[in-house]
Amino acid sequence: LLLLSSLVCCSATAYADEPNLSNSFLPHYEPDQGDALGSSQDTRLHVFTVDYAYVQIPYEVTLWILLASLAKIGFHLYHRLPRLMPESCILIVIGALVGAIIFASDHKSPPVMNSSIYFLYLLPPIILEEGYFMPTRPFFENFVSILWWSLLGSLLNSFGIGLSLYGICQIEAFGLTDLDLLQNLLFGSMISAVDPVAALVVFEEASVNEQLYMMIFGESLLNDGITVVLYNIFIAFTQMHRYEEIESIDVFAGFARFFVVGLGGVLFGIIFGFVSAFMTRFTHNVSAIEPLLVFMFSYLAYLSAETLYISGILAMTSCAVTMKKYVEENVSQNSYTTIKYFMKMLSSVSETLIFVFMGVSTVGKNHEWNWAFICSTLLFCLIWRTLSVFALFYISNKFRTYPFTFKDQLIISYSGLRGASSFSLAFLLPVNLFPRKKLFITATLVVIYFTVFIQGITIGPLVKYLDVKKTNKKESINEEIHVRLMDHLKAGIEDICGHWSHYQLRDKY
Amino acid sequence: LLLLSSLVCCSATAYADEPNLSNSFLPHYEPDQGDALGSSQDTRLHVFTVDYAYVQIPYEVTLWILLASLAKIGFHLYHRLPRLMPESCILIVIGALVGAIIFASDHKSPPVMNSSIYFLYLLPPIILEEGYFMPTRPFFENFVSILWWSLLGSLLNSFGIGLSLYGICQIEAFGLTDLDLLQNLLFGSMISAVDPVAALVVFEEASVNEQLYMMIFGESLLNDGITVVLYNIFIAFTQMHRYEEIESIDVFAGFARFFVVGLGGVLFGIIFGFVSAFMTRFTHNVSAIEPLLVFMFSYLAYLSAETLYISGILAMTSCAVTMKKYVEENVSQNSYTTIKYFMKMLSSVSETLIFVFMGVSTVGKNHEWNWAFICSTLLFCLIWRTLSVFALFYISNKFRTYPFTFKDQLIISYSGLRGASSFSLAFLLPVNLFPRKKLFITATLVVIYFTVFIQGITIGPLVKYLDVKKTNKKESINEEIHVRLMDHLKAGIEDICGHWSHYQLRDKY
């Protein structure tokens, strides 16, 4: 009860901030002139004056971050809540409430979730933290499976959903005949992006075994690159207006684009990673700025990659993986702690903000409802996800020493949570090319809400019910040393034989 | 030699970034369209594309921060440099070089040092770090002396310099007769602001004794509030155009303003400090966001105070002092380390950036040279500083148990380093009211360069030459306990007597 009341108290504090916030979104905000010595027309000297416009941007950013922190604290204060549902659900609900308050007082939803805020500021910290704390060994152990599943999986999903929806659009009764094939394919590529944030939050809370976790992690890592490339290709195709203009060379260029985006991203990341690792060698006299180097170089890798339209996510992840070992050796103990905890802090705040902002953006006038389109989108998302998982794992299992069980596959297909990246892409659509943009936004939101709420809440119990193998127990040091020895031995033997397999890749990191 | 070559290598890396930077300040920057499949006019699909405008802001911020970090690393690599001159000198020189490169390629100096960047983003981290790590005991021990000296000192300096310069302006041969009394007083208030950053950097490197350090620290803390208030009052007076319009009520309002700004700032800080200290009680489940609360609440205190035109510096300092003890008890060990080191990191980066930016802003077309005005400004700054120190300390020494020696006073008067705050205020002047704004900027820059370079470089040797008492040696635990006991005893006795003195204040913190 005490905890509950504290929760209410927290919320009250949060809402005390609200009037400020909602005021600040009024287009023409008039500062209250404290008229201690006369009206605001004359030029007498004032004892009190207010100048809100001056501090507006940092002030609002600070308030949003505080609101998000308070929501998080409130969530954890009430002990039974975290066991009932994942944090993301509560955060979205709080966001929607705040959005409703702002919308009610202003009839205009705040522009908090435009795509550049998401891709430039909110996503990078999360990617950095994931890349930096990624268990490299299991990742490279499962490298081929991850590549196979995430590449073909997202292609299958994109085209599957897009084509099926195009079929639905042909039925005249639904009033969707103005949506052509390209628009449907674009929507398919948008909606098939499994979110790095939503899925992993749920999986961490459910603490599934490493192999399963790595598949989802790898998928969300590579998925983004593929989705964004597909999205850009389809936008470019749509700009050409007529199908006849699309030549085979364009399709080839599209394929080339995939490789450039993927490999370019990795290359960028590795270069930046080595440069920053090298820089940290010279910082022993100025240890105060060591964490800064790590953060700034990773961010620079991300931004540079984004500038060239290659995968920033891959660049940042490979940068973090590359620099990690060297940085750990080079920096002072305190800097290391700071890097670790500050990274965790940043990513946890970004995560919270993303969910809150998604809730806030839900409220507004951007919606168009169409039962047929939205229901079939939801249905096809689920069907194609399940189909692609079982088809692709059936093939990849034939080459694996430890195949994924039926239960594992079920969990993977059930964990296709959509999140903020689909939503941002939907917001980014140019209205002149996509007159039904509002319909796309609504459909995306419905899919996100369905997957985050229904699937997100039930996946924990499902994991428990299916009795999926949970996190592997800690090995003894003796065992670990022997495993490590065998790894090096295998890699060495292969080196001598001139044979090049995935043992090599694993051993380099 | 190896170190020197690494330094060159660092600089080379820094300058490799330069073309990017200087490009980005071109008003209409055309992204290089990688024309892999056609010219940029047609709509063919491209394998490579560049979109720099999208990432411009965060990219440039990141590059500036990296440049500053590299400059700092380079400075510390060459071992003999730190002993020769303070870091600030080198940073300003590097900044001026970078500014010259940008100016040469663009004929336009980058807008890096406008007042809102300085006051909203660069100054707060430094103030927070100083407030948080301030030795509270010696501060409150010397509280009355600090208040006396900083309040009257800056008033004396402002009016002294302003009036003397007005005298100079009356001599027709110098061509300065268009500068009236108010403009001179305004300039006096601007130029008399001792910089919190420049002075303390030098003092920390010279490691003088605590009492001396506290005087300078306290001065720079309170100074800002006074200077900004004076500045605003004079701007308001100037807007009234004619002297006859200034009534005595306005002068009283000016005095009232002082109290509101000072006490309001402290009150704000204490309130925010207690709120954040209270919030950290509930974070034991979400320790990842503990550092965030500390940073965000202090920043919020600063911004709120700035919105109301009361002293943000005082608000932030008192917020940090208030929350410190509670936060230390409430947060986890790792969060505590993160808070400490991240604070140090932020403030060290801000400091570096301020000096680099000051160097960058030096190069440009904003200058007007007038020998008489600039030389007399410099002269009066030195004279009034020395006069006010000796006059005020002569009085305050009569009430002190441990008086400041002649040497101490000499060091204090010599340490009146001007810095970025005067410079930002000069940039902020409205041109329509101050047609000779460029002259003011040039004079401010000359004073800053003189104090930072000449006084900054010689103050270390001077401290050594005068044999000023350096940092007090560590006391034994036994001694410390007894001192603490005596403090409480004295405060208790005074409490019983109903007598209220500075022992009380010291004991509360």
Image (cartoon, coloured by chain):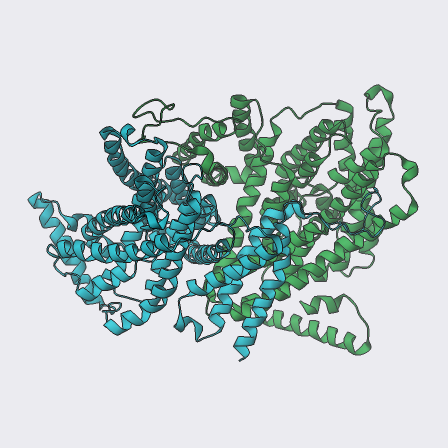
Chain colours: A green, B cyan
Total numbered labels? 0
Which residue is at the far bottom? B1
Say left or right for B454 vs A503: left
Compared to residue B205, the image places residue A37 above or below, namely: above
Q: Position of residue B216 (x, y in %)?
A: 28, 57
Above or below for A40 versus B378: above
In front: B362, or B181?
Answer: B181
Question: Which residue is farthest left?
Answer: B497
Is residue A409 depicted above or below A485 in this figure?
Answer: above
A399 left or right, relative to B350:
right
Residue B285 visible, this angle: no
Q: In terms of image quadrants, where is residue A240?
A: top right
> Residue farthest to the front?
B173
Query: Can see residue B39?
Result: yes
Q: Nearer the viewer, residue B386 or B337?
A: B386
Provide residue B147's location: percent of width, then percent of height: 22, 49
**Residue B287 place in picture, x, y as percent:** 46, 49
> Residue B34, image x and y in percent?
78, 52
Residue at (71, 76) in percent of width and height: A489
Residue at left offset 58%, top offset 28%? A109
- Judge whether A90 appears above or below B281 on screen: above
